[in-house]
Amino acid sequence: MTFRLPTRRALLCATASVATLCALPHAQAQNTYPNKPIRMVVPFAAGGATDVLARVLGQKMAAGLGQPVIVDNKPGAAGIIGTDAVAKAAPDGYTIVLGLSNSLMTNEFLYEKLPYDTQKDLTLVYQIAMAPLVLVVHPSVPAKTGAEVLKYVTANKGKVAYGSYGVGAYPHLAGAHMSLATQSDMSHVAYKGEAPMVQDLIGGQIQMAYASALVAKPHIDSGKVRAIGVSGERRMSTLPNVPTLAEQGLKDEAYRVTGWLAIAVPAKTPKPIVDRIAEEVRKATQQPDVRDRVAAMGFEIKDSSPELFATAWKAERPVWERLIKQSGARLE
């Protein structure tokens, strides 16, 4: 009996056939996506602004996707627990995370050990909104502008305390930068949440803090605290008469960056699925009732995409790294 070795052409054809067969389930999964409910993990407790936004978006996205979007709160460790759960989930588009800039960027500079690597374990999908904060002071502080605040803390070296809702959060980093830049030796007081921080500001236990419009606006309107300026590049639509700190001459990058809210999925999620999720988020955020709800929270809707988000993430990363190193913040 004579055996003939397969020709190179036959081998290539066979290999191609096997590859095609192997790729069929993967391609079919993309073509039928989604065919079951999608889990949107929120790595923070229920009731907060991130959770509220997730539920509003989930409802709108479900209509476009034809499947329920179930919000799953997994709070703990500054967003690490929930984000890590998504990073380790199957890359099939059925588990996504709605996180903040801390869980998707700055935690890597704060924590000695992080169980996930955003660049390797996650794919950035859509930057939903920027989250600027408003610098507010107790009425006993005579300053009414950013420049006057700088003069005040300089003249009262070692006597001014500023609050934050966590070590390494933007209110801590911006306050630490101001203290260092003015050599005013301000005291940092970290709280377990924004509400107790603002209550202590109203009570005069601290003299200044960066707060969200959602929490601060009622107290600004009542005169219990005074708004000085807004972080970021644009005024808040919910506080249109409060200028940005940059407008007032505070040009340092610490006053121009803001936190943000965004969607990410496990790395290796197929590009067509990533694009589909991004498109549904975009459509949801373009709806007037969603935009109004987001604006009322003090957030600014972004026009984003996977590519735009990735570009913005890379541009901001070194800024946050510098701010965190400057503050000396480090957590285990």
Image (spheres, rainbow, N blue to C red):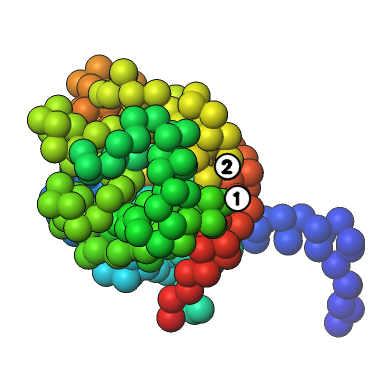
Mark 1 or mark 2, which has the lower sequence index? Answer: 2
x and y, in percent, of residue 291 in the image: 28, 23
Is residue 84 found left or right of 142 in the rendered image?
right
> Compared with residue 130, is residue 244 higher up or lower down, i.e. above or below?
above
**Residue position for label 1:** 319
Q: Secondary structure at mark 1?
A: helix
Residues 254 and 73: in front is 254
Q: Is residue 213 above or below residue 291?
A: below
Amino acid on which disc 2 is placed = Glu
Which residue, as the protein is rendered here, is positioned at the far left? 222
Q: For the residue marked with disc 1, what is the amino acid?
A: Val
Total numbered badges shown on the rendered structure: 2
Q: Quadrant of residue 84?
A: bottom left
Residue at 49% across / 79% down in the picture? 113
Is there CB contact under 8 Å for labels 1 and 2?
yes
- Name the residue located 34 percent from the left edge and 35 percent from the top edge: 143
Query: Which one is nearer the viewer's eye here, 165 or 284?
Result: 165
Is residue 284 something that shows in the picture? no
Q: Would you say residue 289 is visible in this rendering?
A: yes
Quarter the N terminus occupies: bottom right
Q: Position of residue 255 (x, y in %)?
A: 49, 40
* Placement of 167 over or under 211, stated as above or below: below
In this rendering, position of residue 196 left or right of residue 13? left
Q: Position of residue 105 (x, y in %)?
A: 50, 56
**For the residues marked 1 and 2, what is the alpha-carbon distance in whole angstroms?**
7 Å
Of circles 1 and 2, the one toward us is 2
Residue drawn where x is 10% and y is 30% of the image: 222
